[in-house]
Amino acid sequence: MAYNRYITGILPDQNYRFILGSLTDVALEVGHVLNASVPITALLGETMLAAFFLAGHNEKARRTVVGIDMQCNGPARKILAFSSSDGIVRSFCSSPETIWDGDIYRGKKDGLFTVNRFVEDSRKVYSSSVEMHDLPLEKNVEEYLGRSDQKLGFIRMESTIERDILLDVSGFSFEALPGASVEDSERVLEMIRNTGPSEMVHGLLSDGDGERRVFSSSLSSVKILKTGTFEYRCDCSKEKIEKVLLAMGRQSIEDLVAEKGHVEVFCEFCRKRYEFQPSEIYNLFNSED
């Protein structure tokens, strides 16, 4: 059964916080919009989930949006994914129809892994990059946490594909809080080794007894902080496209109008079409004078 939910919480006795979630339905919706292959749909789902984990572990408790930009040497070429700390997600791939043999992460291979953070009520964008290795995406995110944020975190993500159908995209993130000891980390790792992402996530989401079944074997207590639902939403608008056109400059846009008779722009995330007639272009640039 596909879920579209997440849970955040704390393990008080181990000084760890966690996020668990499944966004299968959202991944399938994004894949449909982009006309993406099944492997790309799964990879986009995992990348949106990773962005959500990074956004959700915001210590300042303000709404945060995280963007992951992967410049890939694999067949996916370029992947962008955004998530807010309240589960609003979107993503894009420059080669959505590509397929490959082997594991999901082989679609990205190595390259450059960049994270951009946007904090609500702040005009600042915090950006940092690390080398991306030809390893599962979760390993690249863990390395980013360690090198850029100086945080100890354990992340696992899992995509289930059967008969060329994406059945599930699930994952979890456990991050050490101040005061976590080596023994605390070992206990969390023991639980992670014994429970796969899909089993842990759906065990906790499926019923009221899930919390006890998932955590009782290794950890003594758990405090649920928040539950929510993932939502695919693109924030493009005509006003934002107009700002892009203005940034391109009058001459460049007028050259496009002369060549094609109008200006046509497609949002790369939702494929919405924006068309500007010559009179609109004239008014747009003259209003800036």
Image (tube, rainbow, N blue to C red):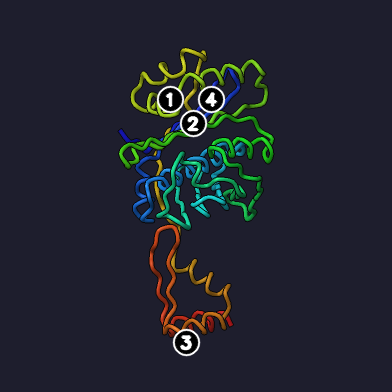
* Residue at image location 40% in from the left, 74% down from the top: 275
Specify whether residue 77 is in view: yes
Specify whether residue 114 is in view: no
Residue sitting at the far bottom: 258
Residues marked 4 and 1 touching at CB (< 8 Å)? no
Q: Which residue is mark 1?
A: 200
What number is the disc on residue 172?
2
Q: Tag 3: residue type? A: Ala
Q: Tag 4: residue type? A: Ile
Quarter holding the C terminus? bottom right
Residues marked 1 and 2 touching at CB (< 8 Å)? yes
Residue sitting at the far front: 101
* Mark 4 vs mark 3, CA separation in Å: 59 Å
Could you say which quadrant of the image residue 278 lies in? Answer: bottom left
Residues marked 4 and 3 touching at CB (< 8 Å)? no
Dot in front, 2 or 4 = 2
Q: Tag 1: residue type? A: Met
* Mark 1 vs mark 3, CA separation in Å: 58 Å
Q: Nearer the N terminus, badge 1 or badge 3?
A: 1
